[in-house]
Each structure stands twice: as structure tokens, then as C-alpha cells.
């Protein structure tokens, strides 16, 4: 088995940052940066950590605060670039930049998702990845990256287990009910549009819509395989992309923010790096 | 085994991973309150039936096919968020105060948990910020028809009769 190398780490880091900025451009295009969202009120959620952060009042400070939005956007969207510069020119700064990224990401994501229209679950990658990026040692990076792989597998597998636990999986009406709840405004607004007709058709044909729900459940359940072998990681990656596309098409939910969580699947074929405890300290760049 | 290899490499790293896993599994097992970054990923796991009646927000000049999912959510999820502002209040009174008290922590002041806004100010904000972003023509600011109280301009219904669904 080929070993995980400094070159692989550089590729991973590069892809992570590339994904971040593709998503940033996508959000900018869709008016999803904080300065475009212009938050005016917030919705408290059932999250103990969030409650502690809310005690600082920072989420209140950001309401109707244009300079605050611009400052937060600037910090959040600059961090990966700063990290890349540190990674490229001075490894000793990498942990410090990653720690700052951790703080910025946490504050930004916690506030951003208190305002409509984003869920914090989809942003979990931005909360966790700074821990992976923080390390200088290649072996630590390898283990943390693989821990993120397991987390990604859990992310999907647990969604399937929840459907079994809460009974959605055993309700033939489930997907029709979901589709009506999800698209009701859309259906009324564009009654003759082909997408509306398609959703109505699905709602009417409960066997088909329920079949779609079960197919989604099965897809999620397949991720359990990843806990036992890395052999099918490429297949899981394809399934993940299928999930994102179907989520967008059927549900109109753009869940692309979780894309970075799948990155470790691309590197799972590599074994534990050599080089003793410290591994390679210097990053390897593309030639 | 992955965690064993991690432990052989670095005890603190492995203990950290183990801690993360245990808290995640605890949140999964309990299934209620979460603690960032430990969440539950249900993704429509609860039983959802076809309701006999739906209250639908509709704006005459907005057609779903002209909106990206994000821009669509920006209108309708925001409306939903505004409607559920009263939940901030009940969450603070019923859960936050109780749980902080239970954890022997000082009970936080409600000012940081309640969104201190009014229907009128949200209406004003909605019209100014949203309509400006969504409508290029000045005459298309149809959100003016929005009443500000219920954030619903038109109500229409889906009705289930004998297993069939009716929509206007």
C-alpha cells in the first residue's frame, strides 16, 4: 500500500481550500454571504454550546450591522487563503493560523446559522476541519484526516438509523408528505411549470415517492460499509454525489456545504506515513 | 484497528478522538438537545403525513421556477423563521433557564436569547432588503402586499379527501 506523503497532504489541503472558494463563489452568486443576508432577527436552537456563545451577545451585535457583516465575511473568507500562504511559506505559522481559523469559523458559523436560512448541521465541516489543519506533523494529519473520514461515514449512516428509529422508514405516506411540506409555496407559485407537475405526480404516486425515500435510506445505510473496509470509498464518493444531486433536484436543498467532509475518501487508499513520530515537516508542492 | 494505531502513535490524539466519538454517540442515543459540534443528522426521519390543510405563503409576482433554491429559501424560510420567533421565548423560559439552573450555572439574561423585533420592523426590513435583491424592476416590489402580521399574503390549501389531494 502506498503511504500517505507530504505531497498527499498538500493535495488534500489544496482541494479543501479550492472547495471552500468554489462554495464561497457559489454563495456569493446566490446572495448567501452575511452582508447579502442582512440579518435582522435570529432563531434560537436547542444547542447547549450555542447558548454559551449567545451569552456574549455577538449574534445580537451583528443584527442590522453592515460593517459587522463585512468584517465577519472578510475574516471568514480570508482564513483559508491565509492558511495556504502559511502552509506554503512558513510551516511554523500553520498551527497559529489554523487556531485563528478555528475561532473565526466557530463564531461565524454559530452566528450565521442562527439567522435564516441555514442549518448548522450542514456547516459542521467548517467547525471541524481547522482541527485537522492545525497539525504540523504528517502522521497527526493522517490520523485526523482519517478520523474525519469516519465522521463522514457516521454523518450518513446515522441519518439512515434515525429514519429507522423515528419511523419515517415505515410510513408509506412519508415522501409525499415531505414533498408537499417542502414545496408548498413553489407549487402554488408556478402551478403549470414542469417541475410542479413532476412533484404533484410524485405526491400522487405514493409508491414511487416512498420508493425514492427508501432508496435514499438504503444509500445512507451503505455508508456503514466504510467502517469495515476502505475498498469501496470511491463508490461511496459516487453515492455521495448522487445524494447531493438528488437532494437538489427532488428537494431543492443545496447541501453542497458538506462537500469537504467527503475529501478523506479520496485519500483513504494511502497507508500510514513513514518517517517516525514527527513524519515530514515540510509540505511538498506540485511541480 | 484505527483507534489502536492512533493510540500507539499519540495517546492524547487517540483520547481526543475517543472523546469526540463518545459524545457523538451520547447525543445520538439521547436524541434531544445537541452540543456543537455534535449534532444529529435525521434528514426527515420523523414520520411525516400528508396534512389535510396547508397554510401557504404566496406572492403574486414570485414564481418558483424563476428562483434558485437559495433565493427561494431566503424568502420562505425567512418567513418561517419570523413566524417561529415566539419559540425563542418558550425555549428560553422552558429549557435554557431550567437547564442552566440544573447545571448550577448562572441563569443567562433573556436579552441574548429573545429576538427583540416587531412585525412592523421585520416587514420594513423584508421589503427593503429582500425586494431590492430579488426584483430588478421597481414596479415589481410586490411584497408591499404582505400584511406584516402573519407574513402571509395569500392562503391556499391542500386538502386530502379520500386519499386524494386537492390544490387550487
Image (tube, rainbow, N blue to C red):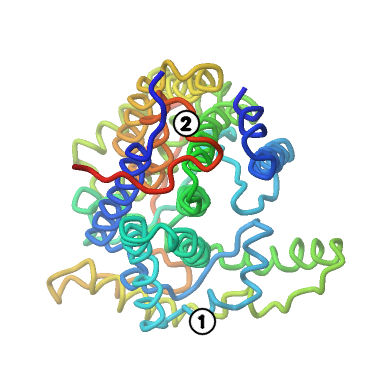
How packed mark 2 is, by other alpha carbons closer than 10 Å (few <14, some 14-19, many 20 or more), is some
Q: Residue at x 30, y 47 (%)?
A: A14
Which of the image's four quarters has the C terminus of chain B?
A: top left
- Above/below status of A258 relative to A244: below
In this rendering, the label closer to the viewer, 1 or 2: 2
Q: Is residue A194 above or below residue A108?
A: above
Foreground pick, B64 / A110: A110
Between the residue at mark 1 and the residue at mark 2, the CA separation in whole angstroms equals 49 Å
Of B16 and A110, the residue lying toward us: B16
Mark 1 secondary-structure assignment: helix
Of B122 and A150, which appears nearest the observer? A150
Disc with the residue nearer the chain's start (1 vs 2): 1
The answer to whether residue B71 is visible is no
- Please report, as a chain letter, where disc 2 is located: A
Left/right placement of residue A9 relative to residue B64 reads right
Q: Quadrant of the N terminus of chain B?
A: top right
- Residue sitting at the far left: B137
Judging by the rendered image, the residue that carries numbered circle 2 is A274
Q: List x then y, in percent, for residue A279.
A: 48, 40
Pinpoint residue A122: horizontal percent, then vertical percent. Answer: 46, 48
Q: Residue at x 57, y 75 (%)?
A: B115
What numbered label is drawn on residue A277?
none
Q: Dot 2: what SS?
A: loop
Of B114 and B10, which appears nearest the observer?
B10
Determine which of the numbered discs, if any, sits on residue A61 in the image: 1
Q: Is residue B38 visible?
A: yes
Amino acid at each position: 500500500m502506498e503511504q500517505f506523503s507530504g505531497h498527499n497532504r498538500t493535495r488534500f489541503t489544496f482541494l479543501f481550500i479550492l472547495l471552500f472558494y468554489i462554495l464561497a463563489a457559489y454563495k456569493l452568486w446566490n446572495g448567501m454571504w452575511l452582508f447579502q443576508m442582512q440579518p435582522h432577527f435570529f432563531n434560537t436552537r436547542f444547542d447547549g454550546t450555542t447558548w454559551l456563545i449567545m451569552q456574549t451577545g455577538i449574534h445580537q451585535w451583528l443584527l442590522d450591522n453592515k460593517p459587522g457583516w463585512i468584517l465577519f465575511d472578510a475574516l471568514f473568507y480570508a482564513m483559508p487563503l491565509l492558511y495556504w500562504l502559511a502552509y506554503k511559506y512558513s510551516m511554523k505559522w500553520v498551527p497559529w493560523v489554523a487556531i485563528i481559523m478555528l475561532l473565526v469559523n466557530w463564531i461565524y458559523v454559530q452566528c450565521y446559522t442562527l439567522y435564516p436560512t441555514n442549518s448548522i448541521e450542514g456547516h459542521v465541516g467548517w467547525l471541524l476541519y481547522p482541527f485537522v489543519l492545525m497539525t504540523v506533523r504528517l502522521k497527526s494529519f493522517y490520523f485526523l484526516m482519517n478520523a474525519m473520514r469516519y465522521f463522514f461515514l457516521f454523518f450518513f449512516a446515522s441519518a439512515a438509523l434515525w429514519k429507522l428509529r423515528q419511523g419515517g422508514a415505515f410510513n408509506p405516506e412519508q415522501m409525499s408528505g415531505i414533498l408537499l411540506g417542502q414545496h408548498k409555496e413553489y407549487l402554488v407559485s408556478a402551478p403549470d411549470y414542469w417541475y410542479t407537475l413532476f412533484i404533484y405526480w410524485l405526491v400522487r404516486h405514493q409508491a414511487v415517492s416512498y420508493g425514492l425515500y427508501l432508496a435514499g435510506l438504503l444509500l445512507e445505510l451503505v455508508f456503514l460499509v466504510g467502517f469495515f473496509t476502505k475498498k469501496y470509498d470511491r463508490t461511496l464518493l459516487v453515492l455521495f454525489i448522487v445524494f447531493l444531486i438528488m437532494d437538489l433536484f427532488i428537494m431543492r436543498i443545496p447541501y453542497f456545504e458538506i462537500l469537504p467532509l467527503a475529501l478523506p475518501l479520496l485519500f483513504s487508499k494511502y497507508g500510514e506515513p513513514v518517517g517516525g513520530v514527527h513524519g515530514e515537516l515540510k509540505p511538498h508542492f506540485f511541480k | 484497528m484505527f483507534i489502536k494505531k492512533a493510540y500507539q502513535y499519540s495517546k492524547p490524539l487517540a483520547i481526543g478522538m475517543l472523546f469526540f466519538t463518545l459524545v457523538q454517540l451520547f447525543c445520538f442515543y439521547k436524541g434531544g438537545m445537541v452540543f456543537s459540534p455534535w449534532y444529529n443528522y435525521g434528514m426527515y426521519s420523523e414520520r411525516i403525513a400528508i396534512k389535510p390543510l396547508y397554510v401557504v405563503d404566496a406572492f403574486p409576482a414570485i414564481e418558483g421556477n424563476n428562483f434558485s433554491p437559495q433565493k427561494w429559501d431566503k424568502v420562505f424560510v425567512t418567513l418561517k423563521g419570523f413566524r417561529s420567533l415566539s419559540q425563542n421565548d418558550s425555549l428560553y423560559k422552558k429549557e435554557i433557564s431550567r437547564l442552566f439552573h440544573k447545571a448550577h450555572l448562572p441563569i443567562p439574561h433573556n436579552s441574548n436569547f429573545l429576538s427583540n423585533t416587531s412585525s412592523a420592523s421585520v416587514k420594513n426590513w423584508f421589503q427593503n432588503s429582500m425586494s431590492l435583491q430579488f426584483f430588478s424592476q421597481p414596479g415589481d416590489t410586490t411584497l408591499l402586499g404582505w400584511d406584516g402580521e402573519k407574513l402571509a399574503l395569500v392562503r391556499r390549501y391542500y386538502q386530502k379527501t379520500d386519499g386524494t389531494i386537492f390544490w387550487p
